[in-house]
Image (tube, rainbow, N blue to C red):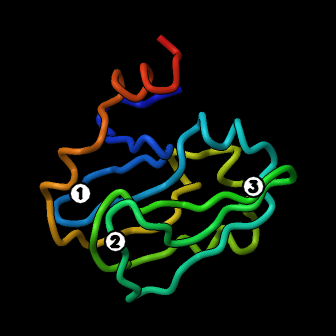
Amino acid sequence: MIPEGLKYSKEHEWVNIEGDTVTIGITDYAQGELGDIVFVELPSVGTKVEYMQPFGTIEAVKAVSDIFSPVTGEIVEVNTALEADAGIVNSDPYGSGWIIKVKIEDGSELDQLLDAAEYQEHIGQN
């Protein structure tokens, strides 16, 4: 499942662009590879994130992985529902399983991301 209209990083994050703010989560492919997600380390609102630098971790039964920011900017919202139930990322990665919202500083960074077809090719599902 790779929704059209989103952008994707090669590190398996998705980005939904809404003006100068983006919503970021991990892809269905990534959650499937991780398995049952048990914990998401959430940064604080106001934290600055840097392009392709880790901003948190996601812990599954079989692995702990960094979550990378596909943009530079300031976190304006975090999905606190994940503190109570990190498994939302497994059940609805593109909806209620979003992780952070970022006010972006440099919109040109979005040009470096993949569209749905490119991401599908990247993960070898074409």
Kind of residue at disc 2: Glu
The residue sitting at 60% across, 34% down in the picture is: 29
Q: Earlier in the sequence, mark 3 or mark 1?
A: 1
Quadrant in the picture for residue 50: bottom left
Among the two numbered marks 2 and 1 on one chain, the one whose residue lies closer to the N terminus: 1
Q: Nearer the viewer, mark 2 or mark 1?
A: 2
Residue where numbered disc 1 is placed:
18
At x 65%, y 74%, the residue is: 41
Q: Is residue 46 positioned above or below 97 on the image? A: below
Hey, what amino acid is under mark 3?
Answer: Gly
Give residue 126's position: percent from left, percent from top.
47, 10
Contact (CB < 8 A) between labels 3 and 2? Answer: no
Q: CA distance from mark 3 to mark 1?
A: 25 Å
Three-letter code for the amino acid on which mark 1 is drawn = Glu
Nearest the eye: 96 or 68: 68
Element carrying mark 3:
loop
The outermost residue toward the front is 53
Spatial CA span between label 2 and label 1: 19 Å
Residue labelled with disc 2: 50
Left or right: 109, with 1 as reference point: left
SS at circle 2: loop
Q: Secondary structure at mark 1?
A: strand
Q: Which residue is mark 3?
A: 87
Circle 1: is it few (<14), some (14-19), or many (20+) Cα within 10 Å? few
**Is residue 19 toward the left or the right of residue 53 in the image?**
left
Q: Residue at x 61, y 41 (%)?
A: 30
Q: Earlier in the sequence, mark 3 or mark 2?
A: 2
